[in-house]
Amino acid sequence: MCWRAVCSPVLSLTGYRGGFWGAGGIPGKRLKRKGRAFLSSGDSTGCGVGGLRRPPEATGLRYVASNKRATLINMSLENPFQDPLRFERRVPECAMVIFGANGDLTKRKLLPALYRLAYERRLDAGFAVLGISRTPLTDDQFREKMLASVKEFLEDSPFDDEVWNAFAQGIFYMAGDFDNAALYPALDARLKEIGAARHTGGNVLFYCSAQPSQYIPIAQGIAAANVGKGSGWRRIVIEKPFGHDLASAQKLSAELHSAFAEAEVYRIDHYLGKETVQNILALRFGNGIFEPLWNRRYVNHVQITAAESIGVEGRGSYYQEAGALRDMIQNHLSQVMATIAMEPSATFRPDAVRDERSKLLRSIRVMKPDEVLQNTVSGQYGPAHIGGQDVPGFRQETGVKPDTQTDTYAAVTFFVDNWRWAGVPFYVRSGKRLPKRVTEIAIQFNAAPLAIFNGDETTTAPNLLILRIQPEEGISLKFLSKRPGAGMKLRPVSMDFNYGSSFGERSPSAYETLLLDAIIGDATLYTRQDMVEASWTVVDAIQHVWDDTKFDFPNYAAGAWGPKAADDMLARRGHVWRQP
Amino acid sequence: MGAAGGTIAPDRILHDMADLWASLGKQGEGDAGVLRACSMTLVVAAEESDDAQAIGETLAALMPEHPSRAIVIRFHHGEQRELAARVFSQCWMPFGHRQQICCEQIEITASDASLPDLAPVVLPLTVPDLPVILWCRGARLFHLPAFAQLAAIAQKVVLDSAAFSDPAAALREMSEAAAAGRLLADLSWTRLTRWRELIAQIFENRAQLANLPLVSDILISHRAAAPPATAYYLAAWLVDGLAQVGAHARVQFQSDGGEPVWRLSRVELRAQGRPEAIASIALAEGAAAEVRTGGLINKALLPALTDYALMREELSIPGADPAFAHALAAAAKLALS
């Protein structure tokens, strides 16, 4: 550290005109010099008298703008008080800008998650939220609205007035139209003002909680006003859908890249934030006993199920444009499948893990048109009478066309063309109005090669490893055991690990995990452009055939486990769906 | 199940435990049965006068997160060698489940004189291949001559220096034991985690971190007349951290009275010539602490910690804790200086 011996730790700059070093420490960015700086003290290593000889990053220094001057901060100085054995993760200072601050996601998920992080003392004291939406509101009015939302939607957590009051001091609001170019210079000015008051170090996390159609105008506005660059780091989080096909996903990425480097784009997939999805990595790569079995030699097939018992719940018009294949399989379930099937990464660094996920997604066989209808099933629920109530079919839902061909159920047989998984079917299904809400992965192992015990079919039941993602996160291993008593009768037994009850701790919500990751700069659980494009490549091949096919919908009743064709698809390979 | 003649046989206890599991299995509904869970052996050494119900409740609360075979040894004064034991289980049923999860518990009553006999009894009762943690709940027990034999079974010994009458002497003794190779934990250090975490979080902010080398004074206010072990630990840890960034700070302790005596009430990091503290944390009434830094005031909840909360944290670190080891050595020096 150059200054420890000879420089002051905080050095004032004179002649500063603002925006001195534009890149804010982002690797690979070209530094832009707009003025001259003179230091009040220095040494021969670059913090020298008479001007700065090296860019701040080269000396481990960085400028943090405050009202009318910049403060030079030693970036190589390490916080000596960290204790990784006991403390949670290190969280840097930052401001978070929420586009769509009046929307449902902000109210139901983002603010409750941020409040909970504040309650858990996970956020910097100066952490700030700047909400933006069209509705004119004052800061105080927005705080009131957010207070009501947090109280309503906070789950498994007490509410504390004092913590809220301190947290709310960092909540700000500005009204604006995302299509209006004037919004973004105003946003930049507001961020500088907030940054100076709350010491956010110029670090900004943008969060697109707006309609997907507004992602591109937001990216364009940020790029045009150069708000994507600043004295600290800048990142943007976007929610799915990441396009509606490969071409639109590529266009969206291109627009985002006009303002942000790919490493600064965080495509959120809340499934990856779930504890059990993360636990898949721990199970596979933290233990020595599973990985040797994790291949085509021992695994017979894999079933991934994401079932919802509810219908479209008033989102009929949106869902009509998406469908189960696009809404679930292209993103959530393909990411889950990649986590299950990927190769071990050399390290647990974000890009190392994401490289392996991406490689796996690129190894999924892209179906030829004539293979699609043999290996996929599209379904749509019809009306039914469940629990004494009439349940409408999808076509009877509000906002849905009476002859819509949208899939509310999708089942796909995927194959992964690599040495580990060649020939192993991955059955993936997702649907609405199925009998229960459950998401799980079932890995069925090959049966014992020889049945030496007499008995019924249960004596040859294959081993199953079940990873439950929701509602009760946990892991079960099913195996055979001798029934007590005379004779050699076997019965299947289950060894259960329940995530909640085994650790007794409150699991953080997926949004708490993912927001903290984005603030910290850990993109492990976020989706990268190449991953999105790989999964769209697979899904587009199916969707194109489906678009050209007239299905005889509805083909399953609400409350059933999908169309019969889905059972037939597995039966062709001698398999049956598990009933979770 | 008491043992006759004032002695106990480990084999007999293990047999009783097997019977216990068999009976628990029979009680299970249908095929649900019970699930046995164990991640360590937790040996609790307590005085007979220690509240048995409170210990039981603490262990029951710990079990879901740290399922263990708990061996509770209750000592009473006595020159006759007397040992007795019984086994039972701690079970709970997670919400929404039909299956009970159970942990086994062994309770041994022993006279002080029988302490040398205990290690050979406890050793075979520990669960193979899993860590053994000894939680010593009294200063007197720690000072019993034969305590070292019992401690030798454990990978880690958890003490509470707040239970010692002289904090400085407690730190010295613990430091000596640690220097001799004993892996220790001190609940007084555990009580500091939230304070330390708040301080660490303040200096994650680069603007605040830049001020750290300017710190010249550390002020620690405590309730007791003399600084408790927590105050020494905090001071030692801060001094060490500041030294890493080139700051050599003076420590000032200040008593402001009140209860509980081991509790801290305020910590401030000051720079010479600056009227405002660079950072301060002050415990207000109730559970809220006021955190001031860089002109910002924040609130953090620091409710009083129960034995359960402290042990829950300590049991999650069954191995060495380098930060504590370092702080213990430094705190002992500071207390004796």
Image: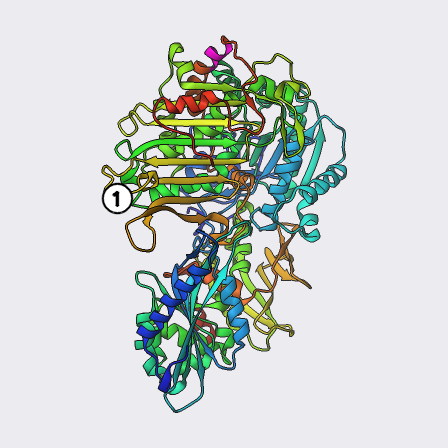
Q: Which quadrant would the N terminus of chain B be assigned to in this image? A: bottom left
User: Residue pushed farthest bottom?
Assistant: B79
Residue marked by disc 1: A453
Residue B200 appears in the picture as rendered: yes
Residue B239 appears in the picture as rendered: no
Going 39% across and 59% down the picture, which residue do you hit?
Answer: B39
Going 40% across and 74% down the picture, which residue do you hit?
Answer: B174
Q: Which quadrant would the C terminus of chain B be assigned to in this image? A: bottom left
Magenta span: A543-547
Compared to residue B179, the image places residue B196 above or below, namely: above
- Out of B140 and A403, give the one closest to the viewer: A403
Residue A88 percent coordinates (x, y): 49, 50
Compared to residue B220, the image places residue A476 above or below, namely: above
* Magenta stretch holds residue A281: no
Q: How is the image coloured?
A: rainbow
- Out of B89 and A333, give the one closest to the viewer: B89
Compared to residue B325, the image places residue A83 above or below, namely: above
Residue A571 percent coordinates (x, y): 38, 24
Compared to residue A230, the image places residue B274 above or below, namely: below
Q: Chain of mark 1?
A: A
Kind of element beneath mark 1: loop
Residue B53 percent coordinates (x, y): 54, 73
The amino acid sitting under disc 1 is: Phe
**Quick one: label 1, few (<14), some, or many (20+) residues within 10 Å?**
few
Q: How many marks?
A: 1
Going 58% across and 51% down the picture, which residue do you hit?
Answer: A121
Predominant SS of the magenta segment: helix
- Out of A205 and A17, give the one closest to the viewer: A205
